[in-house]
Amino acid sequence: MRKIPNFVLLRAFEAAARLQSFSLAAHELHLTPSAISHQVRALEEGFGRALFVRSHRRVELTVQGRRLFESLARVLDALEACCAEVNLAPSGQVLSVYCAPSFAVKWLGPRLPDFMKEHPGITIRLSSGAEPLDLTQARQVDVAITYGDALQRPGVEVTPLGKERIVPLCSPSLKDRRRSWKELISELTLIDSTVSQVTWRDWFAMNGLPMPARARPSFDRGALSVSAAVDGMGVALETTSFAERELARGDLVELGAMAFKHIDREMHFFSQRINEKQVDKVKRFKQWLLERVRSTAGGGGDALRVRASPSTKPPSSG
C-alpha cells in the first residue's frame, strides 16, 4: 500500500494553507473550525512536526508546511485535471503536448485557438520545459516539441520543423538614419540568449565583422530576449518565428536586412512514439502542426523531413 496520509486530513490542510484560515477552510469544506483544527493536528502528529504556527486570529505555514502545501497543490491540480477528463464527451480526446517554453509562448500558443476550432473534440494539455523529453519514459506525454535537438530513442520518430531564419532584431527607435547598420551594430548593445545554439560570434564571423569586446546582457529564454529588444535594451539575435507579432506591429525590425547575411538552421523538432502514429489525436495534431509550419513565412517547409530514430546516441545539451 502507498504510504500516504488520510486524504481527509490532507484536504483539510490544503484548504487551511491556501486560505490561511481554519475558519475559511471550515466554511469551504462544510465543517467546523474545531474539526479543521483537529484534522490538521492529526496530520501534524503523523508527520511528527508542526505545519502551522498558530496565533489568536491567524495561522501561518512553517517551512515544512510550505513545502508540503506547494507539492500538494500541484498534485491536487493534476488530480482535478484527470477527473475532469472523465467528464469529456464520449468522443472527446486529451492530447498532452510537451513544448519548449519560447516556442510555446511565441509560436504555438497564438495558433492553438485555430486548432481547437478545427478539432473541438481534442482537448490540449500543454506543459513546457527547456530540456528534451524522453518519450519512452514520459508515458503521460503524447508528443513533444523540443529546441535544439530531440532525444534519439528506439521507437521514437523525430520530425525537424524546418529551417528558421535567425537575424538581429531591434526596436526601430535604435536606428540612426545618418549612420549605416554596419556602424550601428558595432556600437549597439548585443543581447545574448544563453541557451541559443546560434551565437553572436557565429553571426559576426558569417558577416566578416569583428566581434565587439564589450559586456552583453543575457537571458535564458528566446522570448525574453525578444521582449528586451522591443523595450529598446539592444539587439537580439533570434529566430523570426519568435517575433512574428512584434515584426508585424513594427515593434521590431530586422537590423540590416539588406546589408547582412542571415543564418538558416533547424531549431525545433517534433517527436512522437512510432507505435502511436495512427492514434487519431496524434495524427491530427501533427498534420495541423506541419501545415502551419509550411504556411509560415520563413518556416522552411521544404526542409521538413522525417527521420525515425533507431539509435540510442546520447542526448544533446539542447
Image: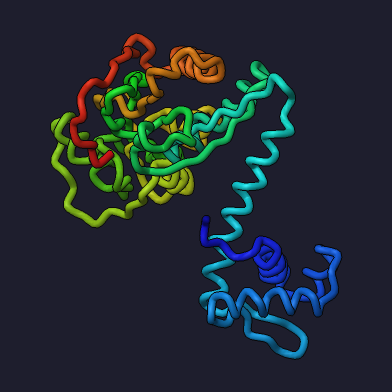
Locate residue 77 relative to residue 208 in the image: left or right.
right
In front here: 184 or 77? 77
Locate residue 45 relative to residue 31 in the image: left or right.
left
Residue at 48% of width from left, 48% of height from top? 231
Query: Percent position (x, y) of residue 108?
Result: 51, 29
**Does the image show residue 254?**
no
Query: Percent position (x, y) of residue 27?
Result: 85, 67
Residue at 52% of width from left, 75% of height from top? 64
Locate residue 26 relative to residue 170 in the image: left or right.
right
**Does the image show residue 75?**
yes
**Above-or-below relation of 245 to 50:** above
Residue at 66% of width from left, 77% of height from top? 42
Q: Quadrant of the C terminus?
A: top left
Query: Percent position (x, y) of residue 206?
Result: 17, 29
**Above-or-below relation of 28 to 199:** below
Q: Quadrant of residue 31?
A: bottom right
Residue at 61% of width from left, 58% of height from top? 73
Q: Quadrant of residue 160?
A: top left
In front here: 25 or 315? 25
